[in-house]
Amino acid sequence: LLSIGECLKVLGRFDEAENAILEAIKLNPTWSTAYIELASTYNTQHFWGRSVEWAEVALTKERPKTNYVTSDIDYTLKPLSLLSQGYLMLGRYEPAYRYAQKMCAISPAFPNAQLALETTKEAHRLNQFVEHAVELIVEIRHKDRQAAVKILDAIPESLADDIRIQQLRSTICPPNVWSNKSVVIYCPPAYEAWSPNSVYKGIGGSEEAVIYLSKELVKLGYEVTEAIVTGK
């Protein structure tokens, strides 16, 4: 059943894969194998909450008692990896970092362990930075709003998309007043950085449309602002 589930997962038939793995759990609910595979199936679909839930259950189950050779990677490092990645994607950086540390303690030479440790450690550090920055700015704004705005403007651009920073900015910073003849075009993340000059070297159709539309609007007397997100 587990082999069938793995094959169905590779084929992208996730509902059938899930059913096969659940049947395997019914047959042997004490071994961790099926729980790990179910967590992996949800991980593949980016269902991070479900993946974490089943990986946590897997850690409470026993390793198969069998004459077949079993691997520490499959029964120890894999569930820890699923948990570290799952918690990271859920924005729960402390448990993500904790499970990455466990991976490195078990197998320091395992490449995925080192990568997970570095990634979650940096995410945990940045999360703490944002938390402390928000606390500081909220405290300062009660006494000096302009000073709070200056501190907010000093936060690195790489953290500007953090929802906590965005919410704080919307409550502290004065709104930008646009003229009646202004147009703002918001461009979502693209595969590469681009600008109006990109038409001379080649650019995607959607970006090209924005560039030429902006030029025509300017001819009609509009002030055009293009908010371009590079996706970096």
Image (tube, rainbow, N blue to C red):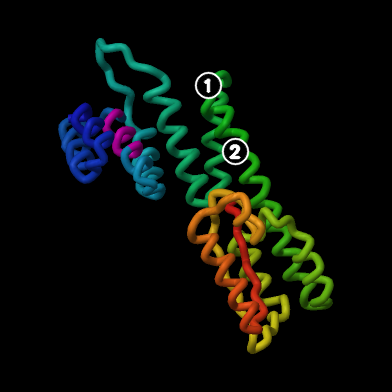
Q: Horizontally, is 208 left or right of 45 in the view?
A: right
Query: In the rendered view, would you say 189 is above or below 8?
Result: below
- Quarter holding residue 115: top right
Give how far across and how far down residue 207 sits, in percent: 54, 60
Q: Horizontally, is 131 left or right of 142 in the view?
A: left
Q: Which residue is mark 2?
A: 119
Q: Is residue 17 visible?
A: yes
Give how far across and how far down residue 111 sits, in percent: 54, 24
Query: In the rendered view, would you say 1 is above or below 146?
Result: above
Residue 216 inside the magenta-drawn segment: no
Q: Which residue is mark 1?
A: 110
Element carrying mark 1: loop
Give the class, few, some or many, for how many residues have Cα within 10 Å of label 2's Cα (few <14, many ≥20). Answer: some
Tell me the amino acid under the disc marked 2.
Answer: Thr
Labels 1 and 2: the sequence-earlier one: 1
| Residue drawn at (29%, 28%) of the image | 33
| Residue drawn at (59%, 33%) of the image | 117
| Residue drawn at (34%, 39%) of the image | 39
| Residue drawn at (53%, 30%) of the image | 102
Residue range in magenta is 33-40
Tell me the amino acid under the disc marked 1.
Answer: Phe
User: Residues at badges 1 and 2 in contact (C-beta under 8 Å)?
Assistant: no
Q: Is most of the magenta stretch helix, strand or loop?
A: helix
Q: Is residue 57 visible?
A: no
Q: In the displayed orientation, state which residue is furthest to the bottom.
A: 180
Q: Nearer the viewer, residue 157 or 125?
A: 157
Quadrant of the drawing holding the N terminus: top left
Q: CA distance from mark 1 to mark 2?
A: 15 Å
Q: Nearer the viewer, residue 83 or 18?
A: 18
**Mark number, residue 56:** none
